[in-house]
Amino acid sequence: MAIRAEPDFADYQRQFEANYEKLNYANNLSSRVLAHSHTVVEKAFGPQDHFSKVLEVGAGSGQHAASVRHGFDEYWLTEGNPNMLDQARARIGPDERFRYQSEDATRLSFESGSFDRLIATHVLEHIVHPHEVLREWARVIRPGGTLSLVLPCDPGLAWRAGRSFGVRQRAEGAGIAYDYWMAREHVNSIFNLVTFIGYYFHDINATWWPLRLPFADINLIYAASIRI
């Protein structure tokens, strides 16, 4: 019996880009969880805080910027997909504080110590060698700066159950083989990622949401602000 043909990645990319907002931020339970995940990591900051230069890696369509509570002079949105950067520009609109640049999140072009804060929301679970990338992200943060991470508690029990509330149906309705692509996209488990974070860093302000207890199986989101 012949093996099933490989799906067309370029077609998946087109479908994903065209349906990004609908898949991830539509008005349903799973989308509200994803939208709320951006606010969880920002609760550590307020208007009294100021970061001169902020770098966001894997910025997608620019959703996270609206949740930032602190002041800043420059906010760099970087993304490997130029089409997603275009969506971010359209979302944010004219604001000279925002800069847009195509970047490989695993090998940044910026000099060491260039930024006061680096933000990565729902990025690290997609990266093949996260232990190396964490070191790369820390490289571009000045001493005393902050690394902010948001991660899904995948494959925890609560996260796997939550996938049934909207996102899978919307993806399949758009012609996307959701479970297949998630298996290829989410290559790192929350259990491994938290282990790496705890090994490399010591000054970690971590939040598990919604139940606060530090167990991935009963939560949906892990957020951390890490002092470098």
Image (spheres, rainbow, N blue to C red):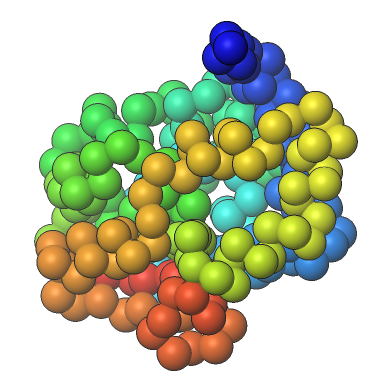
Left or right relative to 143: residue 12: right
217 above or below 7?
A: below
Location of the C terminus by quadrant is: bottom left
User: Which residue sits furthest front?
Assistant: 1
Q: Count numbered badges in the picture.
A: 0
Q: Nearer the viewer, residue 226 or 96?
A: 226
Location of the N terminus by quadrant is: top right
Residue under the point 86% across and 36% down:
173
Q: Residue 162, located in which quarter of the rendered image?
A: bottom right
Where is residue 141 shown, x and y percent of the image?
Answer: 21, 52
Left or right relative to 83: residue 103: left
Residue under the point 75% across and 59% down:
164
Q: Tell me if I can see residue 55 in this picture.
A: yes
Q: Nearer the viewer, residue 18 or 112?
A: 18
Left or right relative to 92: residue 105: left
Where is residue 143 shown, x and y percent of the image?
Answer: 13, 61
102 above or below 44?
A: above
Q: Tell me if I can see residue 54 in this picture.
A: no
Residue under the point 25% across and 76% down:
204
Q: Residue 67, located in which quarter of the rendered image?
A: bottom right
Q: Nearer the viewer, residue 201 or 218?
A: 218
Where is residue 145 shown, x and y percent of the image?
Answer: 23, 63
Residue under the point 55% across and 70% down:
157
Where is residue 39 shown, x and y percent of the image?
Answer: 58, 70
